[in-house]
């Protein structure tokens, strides 16, 4: 395809400009400029094309924004779908740390990371916030694999120096040097693949390491990702390690890791009161990971309440605490969790399909820039869904999207776009 020229795509177009409802253009048109950004959508071709565009007809397919995964661990890929018999802290010790140690070996990392990037692609996830490991070389490799693929990612070299095996512990100097190398190499502010400051969580980092992480984020204006209030034993451990802090979130805040630069915190299952207020004040995003919260028996995050309070929430697969890389399936789990909470706690309502879709697209996408919607100026990250095998009874475009979210998989994803370009299967 010639990307120097304007493109107009024809299909049934669906997206969530607002959280509460879908925009649906049956047999609509979407124009993309040579800069890879959406020019506009319309039911009328003439309003988008004055003869200067290449028109591509996707026929009866659906055209939707691509998925964003706000929290996923690339080096836990081998453990996907196993080791579900323990809660968080013993799970980390027994299964997760031993696997992450293997990423000191570049060849092992390459084999696994290639599969990981290919499978993100397969499920239509074009942007992700990714934890790597402490190993700078393997982290660089993962970043280059995303670049090769043409997919967007914030990739975090993981900072750790306590409560972990010595093989996963780095000195402050090594940690800082590793980050500075990656920052120097991946330093374009508009680049698709960028570093993100990633203290694993408070128990894994000494106060000095947390302080250095906050300083690196401020110095290089880098975003931050970590875990927050996932599990009750974890929260008690944080309270004992940081007795001066008023809540878990406040412990991050003391070190400049809570919204001083764009920040996303995974889980927030037990976030309430002061922590919730602090997140709102600081614009800290929540990465809701329902499959992980089920598998590790962590609890159920009150996402309905978070949305009502105005928190920004996206969805994460959290492989391998979570077992399912599909963000479509994660939407279904998020809705189901909200329905259990609705019954248990008399929460006012459960999540609607548009709310789940909005969390996965426009809300999560906001962490990466203007991503996740088809409004003018948004980067064209999109999926073409060919659901012929599911659409056997004249469903409406919105019913077809719902069926695809609940019943579909990678087989119905006909094309994937990131930043305006078709993304083919990574090697
Ligand atoms: N908290 C600290 N590390 C991890 C991890 O790898 N997975 C999850 N789910 N929680 C964590
Ligand atoms: Fe995680």
Image (spheres, rainbow, N blue to C red):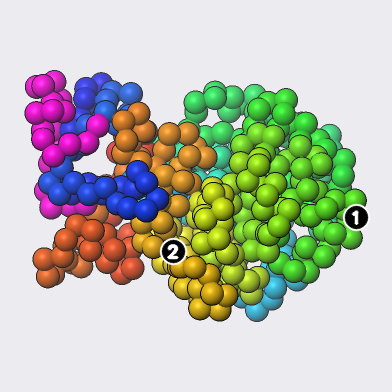
**Would you say residue 60 sits in the magenta stretch?**
yes
Question: Is residue 312 found left or right of 91 in the rendered image?
Answer: left
- Looking at the rendered structure, which numbered label has been put on residue 110? none
Residue 135 position by quadrant: top right
Of callouts 1 and 2, the N-terminal one? 1
Residue 402 location in percent, x, y?
A: 29, 63
Which residue sits at x=28%, y=54%?
A: 413
Which residue sits at x=45%, y=42%?
A: 365
Residue 327's place in the image compared with 372, above or below, is below
* The CB of the residue at mark 2 lies under 8 Å from ligand 1: no
User: Of 328 and 311, which appears nearest the observer?
Assistant: 311
- Between the C-alphas of marks 1 and 2, the distance is 36 Å
On the question of residue 158 being in view, the answer is no
- Give the secondary structure at mark 1: loop
Residue 312's place in the image compared with 1, above or below, is below
Quarter of the picture containing the N terminus is: top left
Which residue sits at x=56%, y=49%?
A: 311
Residue 306 location in percent, x, y?
A: 56, 56
Residue 64's place in the image compared with 395, above or below, is above
Question: Is residue 363 found left or right of 23 in the rendered image?
Answer: right
Give the labeled residue for mark 1. 243
Q: Range of the magenta residues? A: 40-62
User: Of 425 and 324, which appears nearest the observer?
Assistant: 324
């Amino acid at each position: 395809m010639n990307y120097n020229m304007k493109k107009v795509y024809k299909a049934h177009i669906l997206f969530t400009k607002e959280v509460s409802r879908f925009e649906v253009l049956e047999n609509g048109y979407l124009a993309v400029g040579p800069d890879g950004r959406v020019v506009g959508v319309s039911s009328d071709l003439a309003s988008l094309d004055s003869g200067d565009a290449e028109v591509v007809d996707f026929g009866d397919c659906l055209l939707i924004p691509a998925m964003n995964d706000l929290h996923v661990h690339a080096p836990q890929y081998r453990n996907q779908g196993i080791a579900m018999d323990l809660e968080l802290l013993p799970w980390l010790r027994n299964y997760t740390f031993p696997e992450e140690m293997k990423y000191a070996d570049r060849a092992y990392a390459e084999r696994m990371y290639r599969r990981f990037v290919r499978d993100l692609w397969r499920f239509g996830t074009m942007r992700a916030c990714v934890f790597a490991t402490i190993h700078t070389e393997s982290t660089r490799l993962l970043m280059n694999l995303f670049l090769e693929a043409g997919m967007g990612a914030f990739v975090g070299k993981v900072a750790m120096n306590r409560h972990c095996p010595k093989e996963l512990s780095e000195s402050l100097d090594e940690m800082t040097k590793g980050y500075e190398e990656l920052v120097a190499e991946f330093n374009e502010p508009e680049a698709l693949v960028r570093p993100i400051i990633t203290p694993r969580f408070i128990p894994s980092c000494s106060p000095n390491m947390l302080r250095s992480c906050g300083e690196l984020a401020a110095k290089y204006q880098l975003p931050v990702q970590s875990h927050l209030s996932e599990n009750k034993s974890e929260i008690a451990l944080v309270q004992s390690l940081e007795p001066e802090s008023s809540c878990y979130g406040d412990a991050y805040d003391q070190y400049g890791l809570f919204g001083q630069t764009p920040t996303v915190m995974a889980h927030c299952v037990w976030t309430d009161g002061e922590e919730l207020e602090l997140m709102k004040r600081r614009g800290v995003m929540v990465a809701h990971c329902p499959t992980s919260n089920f598998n590790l028996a962590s609890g159920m995050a009150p996402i309905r309440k978070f949305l009502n309070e105005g928190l920004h929430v996206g969805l994460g697969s959290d492989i391998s605490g979570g077992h399912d890389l599909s963000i479509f399936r994660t939407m279904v789990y998020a809705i189901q969790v909200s329905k259990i909470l609705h019954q248990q706690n008399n929460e006012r309502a459960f999540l609607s399909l548009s709310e789940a879709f909005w969390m996965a697209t426009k809300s999560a996408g906001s962490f990466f820039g203007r991503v996740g919607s088809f409004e003018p100026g948004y980067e064209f990250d999109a999926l073409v869904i060919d659901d012929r095998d599911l659409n056997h009874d004249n469903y409406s475009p919105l019913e077809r999207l719902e069926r695809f979210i609940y019943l579909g998989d990678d087989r119905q994803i006909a094309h994937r776009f990131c930043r305006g370009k078709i993304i083919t299967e990574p090697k």
